[in-house]
Structure formats: C-alpha cells, structure tokens
Amino acid sequence: MASWALPCRLPPTYAVGMDDDLDWGAQPRCPEDGILMRDVPGGWECPHCGHVQHAPEVELPPEFDGPSIHGG
C-alpha cells in the first residue's frame, strides 16, 4: 500500500459512537433472538422463530389532481 493511501476501515468507535438518525428506516431485528427480520405483507417476520411484527398503519396522502409537469 502506498504511504499516502487512506485506511479502508473506519475505527470501531465511529460505528458505535455515531448518532446520525439513519436507523429509522433500518430493517427491524427480532426481539426474541436478534435475527434480522424479513418483509412479509403488512410487517416483518423472523425467519428463525416466526415472530411477526406488524407495520404501523399510515394515512396515505391524497392523490394529486392538478396539471402535470408537461402541462397535460
């Protein structure tokens, strides 16, 4: 490796200490065994133990009813 090259790995404290609010959209982990849950209709399911976590209900915004970008 050249003497000017930067290291490829970040220090371990970066991943632990960084609080950037990007985890709000992360795939949830099973509260029973910590396994990454998989998408299923209406929520997530643990592939190991079968625990199901339902997604919260959200209100969809109204459909846009106006002129398009191209004037149509």
Image (cartoon, rainbow, N blue to C red):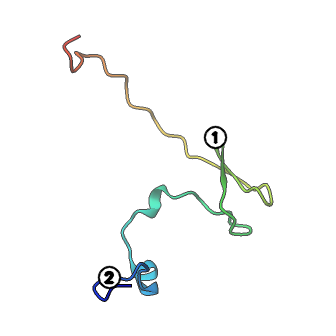
Within 10 Å of disc 2 (Cα), the crowding (few <14, some 14-19, many 20+) is few
Q: Distance between the residues labelled 1 and 2?
A: 47 Å
Q: In which quarter of the image is residue 69?
A: top left
Q: Is residue 51 above or below residue 67?
A: below
Q: In this view, does 8 lie above or below 60?
A: below
Amino acid type shown at disc 1 = Gly
**Earlier along the polypeptide chain: callout 1 or callout 2?**
2
Residue 5 numbered tag: 2
Q: Is mark 2 on a helix, strand or loop?
A: loop
Residue at 63% x, 40% y is: 42
Residue at 41% x, 78% y is: 8
Residue at 73% x, 56% y is: 46
Q: Give the position of the N terminus as an image quadrant.
A: bottom left
Furthest residue in direction bottom, as rendered:
3
Judged left or right of residue 20, residue 36 is right
Residue under label 1, please give it.
42
Amino acid type shown at disc 2 = Ala
Residue 60 numbered tag: none
Q: Is residue 71 above or below residue 7?
A: above
Furthest residue in direction top, as rendered:
72
Judged left or right of residue 37, residue 17 is left
Residue at 74% x, 67% y is: 32
Q: Give the position of the C terminus as an image quadrant.
A: top left
Furthest residue in direction right, as rendered:
49
Furthest residue in direction front, as rendered:
2
Closer to the camera, 15 or 31? 15
Residue 54 in the image, given as x and y percentages of width and height: 64, 48
Within 10 Å of disc 1 (Cα), the crowding (few <14, some 14-19, many 20+) is few
Residue 7 in the image, given as x and y percentages of width and height: 38, 83
